[in-house]
Amino acid sequence: MSDSVNIDKISELRVSYKKAKLSIGDLNSNPIDQFKEWLHNAMKADIIEPTAMTLATVNNLGQPSLRNVLLKGISEKGFVFYTNYESRKGSEINTNNNVSINFLWKELERQVTINGHAEKISQKESEKYFKSRPIGHQISAWASTQSSKIPNREWMIEREQSMLSKFGTGEIPYPEFWGGFNITPKEIEFWQGRENRMHDRIQYVRNNEGWSKSRLSP
Ligand SMILES: Cc1cc2nc3c(=O)[nH]c(=O)nc-3n(C[C@H](O)[C@H](O)[C@H](O)COP(=O)(O)O)c2cc1C
């Protein structure tokens, strides 16, 4: 069978971005409203997991690490995601709460990058969201010792089963080691791919009055 792809030729892979342009005056003066508009566009475009964002944290040696998480809330206060507070990301945020997130909407030739700091949301809010999750997800939050080494998959399934029998058919209690983080943004950059790598980049920086907007070189 012939195969038209060749991984030795990745240096020749090239996409020309032509879908849209960004002008500083057309963007909303509030980057949160601008973000909502772009997320709306991404959801309308039927992109898989439009709320997926890559989250960067740093450890106490300054070593960054990345993973994807799902955005579950946006407000003037910032961007909320949920996780295990004892996971690698959770403990890194505990020692250094400077984080970055990046949304890549390839189909729209767009990315948004946000720098800020993460803080736990209230237990009440986390609990409310936890209870809105499907039962299987609630059980797995209890069963997962997220980021720790485990012997094998069977061990994990046994833990899931034992949590299922422990909680029976009643309401599953909220696990205090699990919950939301809100990322308060200080810089938000909107990136639109353009032809010949002459991309549009508009960056908002928080100041005393609100936000200032600048164009950055691609
Ligand atoms: C698209 C996508 C969405 C994910 N969403 C979450 C999430 O919302 N929360 C979470 O804890 N892990 C999520 N994960 C798993 C994380 O990427 C990661 O593997 C896990 O949280 C452990 O990360 P850590 O060891 O760096 O703490 C998601 C993975 C993918 C690929």
Image (cartoon, rainbow, N blue to C red):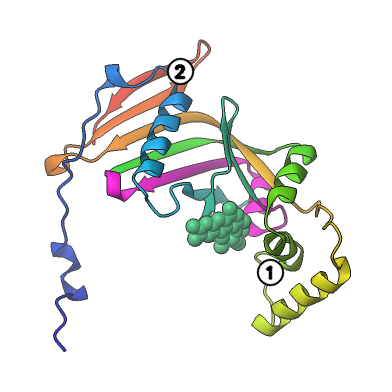
Neighbour class for label 2 at 10 Å: few (<14), some, many (≥20)?
Answer: some
For the N terminus, the quadrant is: bottom left
**Residue 78: quadrant of the picture:** top right
Residue in the picture at 51% in, 10% down: 209
Can you tell which quarter of the image residue 122 is in? top right
As drawn, 188 above or below 177: above
Q: Most extreme residue toward the bottom, as rendered?
A: 1
Q: Is residue 203 magenta?
A: no
The magenta-colored residue range is: 83-108
Write the residue at 69% across / 64% down. 136
Nearer the observer, 200 or 30: 30
Q: Total of numbered circles in the picture?
A: 2
Residue 97 pos. (x, y %): 63, 41
Label 2 C-beta lies within 8 Å of the nearest ligand 1 atom:
no
Q: Earlier in the sequence, mark 2 or mark 1?
A: 1
How far apart are the two marked residues, 2 and 1, measured between alpha carbons?
A: 40 Å
The residue singled out by tag 1 in the image is 148
Residue 218 appears at what percent x and percent y? 23, 36
Q: In this orientation, does residue 152 appear?
A: no
Q: Which mark is residue 211?
A: 2
Residue type highlighted by circle 1: Ser
